[in-house]
Image (cartoon, rainbow, N blue to C red):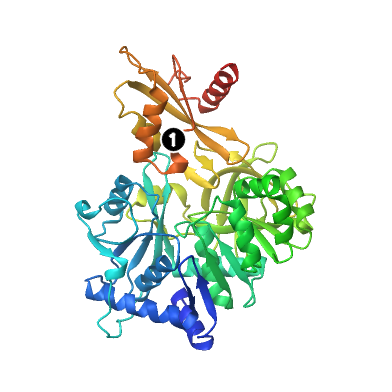
């Protein structure tokens, strides 16, 4: 039986079959498949010279762009395990990632702080230089790792295999049908599976990508779609709300180029989907459903499912979906199984066992229902995870940071509804007997800004007398959210 191709093998093959075809561009430069692969080989040799070996974890703290991709593939080539981070990660978060993955190396470019005191061997991207020799190719069972948060708020490193990577890419190709003629605009970070998965798919079909980190500049993105003649666009619901409300005419003009639009799995109100179908009548609009641990589990093509605008989708290629332990109304936990499911959490067998069953099903933590045709509708979260524009935040992570402030006696964080980002972070604080600073909100925000990524920083911060909880002390976050909303309305 022939050996299965990894994504690095597909990249090599593409560099041989289409060496002069443009692969990817960013704000700095554009590279062909042949040139890109040559750069990957050079950096791979440089990494080996620096001491990186097969199986070694390497943190990638690099801007969203070509250099991130070069570093990623260079690690894969020599059998190292790239660990995707981004420039928004706090220094303490980078230190935590290094500790969890037991890594000694970090490829860095453009980070705002000095990382040399973290005990890592910092490898500035520009200083990873080949001596001219050919790097030794190797492989590792884990293709790459990304982080997700567990119920305790402690991040977990998701081990994504080469099989997972290819399965996810083939799912994208199956439902969105990108071709060698397509050019995608990708502004969503490569440290998340959404954007990286599409890079993999484009390599397999020989397509082209334009990477930009100006994710929230909708006017720029609309112009870039037209100027770059992008045929594919990846977006979050928040981005699309902004485009439909404040850049309507430009969005309509984008429809002349856009062949398909893919939305990540943050819930999107049916009225927005209907508006997109109206403004972009020639564009195929898809939403996918998944998680870091099992990317691209389901999808829906809204153009042909106008009666299911509140659904998330049916099973992707070779994936099975089910509703586990449904109640009388059919609501239960959404579970999935297939070649896209992770091999586990790095060095965390206990968490892996809680998330995955012995027969290969993975628990999503989402409540949902399934119709007779296999389409799933997400009802809500089983746990208290907050979904900010598709990015996941655990309350405990934010609570631990706020508790460091001297005037805070107790704090509980919850999800608050937001018309643009689906949810934002709200924080309720119980103070001690001492004097409470008049500028307590500013103090909390400033402290969180130093310690947390932007989407995890609380938007609403209120003082309350008592955190709502049951007799056993378990916090009622739903009741807390209602309390915070009530206080905001009264203010």
Which residue is rendered at x = 48% and y = 54% of the image? 292
Q: Is residue 102 at all visible to an observer of this figure? A: yes
Work out whether 347 lies above or below 272. below
Taking the spot 21% from the left edge, 55% from the top edge, the residue there is 116
Residue that numbered label 1 is attached to: 395
Q: Which residue is drawn at 76% across and 48% down?
A: 275
Quick check: 453 left or right of 371?
left
- Numbered circles on residues, count: 1
Q: Where is residue 119 in the image (x, y as percent from the top left)?
A: 19, 54
Say above or below: 79 vs 217: below
**Residue drawn 26% across the image and 71% down it:** 53
Secondary structure at numbered mark 1: helix
Residue farthest bottom in this picture: 17
* Quadrant in which residue 446 is drawn: top left
Indicate left or right for 473 with 168 as reference.
Answer: left
From the viewer's side, name the closer residue of 222 and 396. Answer: 222
Indicate the position of residue 78 as horizontal and vertical percent values: 32, 75
Point out residue 250 in the picture as x, y percentages from the top left corner. Answer: 70, 55
Question: Is residue 474 visible in this depiction of the protein?
Answer: no
């Amino acid at each position: 039986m022939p050996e299965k191709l990894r994504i690095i093998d597909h990249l090599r093959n593409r560099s041989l079959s289409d060496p002069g075809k443009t692969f990817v561009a960013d704000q700095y430069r554009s590279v062909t498949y042949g040139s890109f692969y040559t750069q990957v080989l050079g950096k791979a040799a440089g990494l080996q010279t620096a001491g990186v070996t097969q199986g070694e974890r390497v943190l990638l703290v690099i801007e969203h762009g070509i250099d991130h991709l070069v570093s990623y593939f260079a690690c894969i080539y020599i059998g190292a395990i790239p660990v995707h981070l981004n420039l928004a990660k706090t220094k303490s978060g980078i230190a935590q990632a290094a500790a969890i993955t037991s890594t000694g190396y970090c490829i860095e470019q453009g980070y705002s702080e000095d990382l040399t005191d973290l005990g890592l061997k910092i490898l500035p991207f520009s200083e990873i230089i080949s001596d001219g020799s050919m790097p030794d190719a190797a492989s590792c069972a884990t293709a790459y790792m990304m982080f997700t948060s567990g119920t305790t708020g402690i991040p977990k490193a998701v081990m994504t295999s080469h099989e997972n990577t290819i399965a996810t890419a083939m799912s994208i190709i199956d439902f969105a049908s990108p071709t060698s003629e397509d050019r995608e605009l990708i502004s969503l970070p490569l440290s998340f599976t959404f954007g990286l998965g599409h890079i993999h798919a484009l390599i397999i079909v020989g397509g082209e990508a334009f990477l930009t980190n100006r994710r929230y500049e909708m006017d720029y993105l609309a112009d870039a779609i037209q100027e770059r003649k992008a045929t594919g666009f990846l977006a979050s619901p928040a981005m699309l709300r902004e485009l439909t409300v404040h850049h309507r005419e430009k969005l309509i003009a984008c429809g002349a180029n856009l062949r398909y639009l893919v939305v990540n799995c943050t819930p999107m109100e049916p009225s927005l989907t209907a508006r997109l179908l109206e403004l972009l009548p020639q564009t195929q609009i898809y939403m996918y459903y998944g998680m870091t641990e099992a990317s691209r589990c389901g999808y829906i093509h809204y153009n042909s499912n106008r009666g299911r605008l509140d659904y998330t989708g049916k099973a992707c290629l070779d994936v099975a979906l089910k509703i586990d332990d449904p109640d009388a109304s059919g609501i239960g936990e959404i579970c999935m199984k297939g070649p896209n499911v992770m091999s586990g959490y790095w060095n965390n067998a206990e968490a892996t066992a809680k998330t995955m069953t012995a027969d290969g099903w993975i628990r999503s933590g989402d409540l949902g229902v399934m119709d007779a045709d296999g389409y799933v509708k997400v009802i809500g979260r089983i746990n208290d995870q907050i979904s900010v524009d598709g990015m996941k935040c655990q309350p405990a992570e934010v609570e631990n940071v706020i508790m460091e402030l001297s005037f805070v006696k107790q704090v509980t964080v919850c999800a608050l509804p937001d018309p643009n980002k689906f949810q934002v972070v709200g924080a309720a604080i119980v103070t001690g007997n001492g004097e409470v600073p008049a500028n307590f909100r500013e103090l909390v925000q400033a402290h969180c800004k130093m310690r947390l990524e932007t989407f995890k920083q609380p938007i609403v911060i209120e003082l309350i007398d008592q955190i709502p909880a049951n007799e056993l002390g378990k916090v009622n976050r739903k009741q807390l959210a209602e309390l915070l909303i009530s206080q905001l309305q009264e203010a």
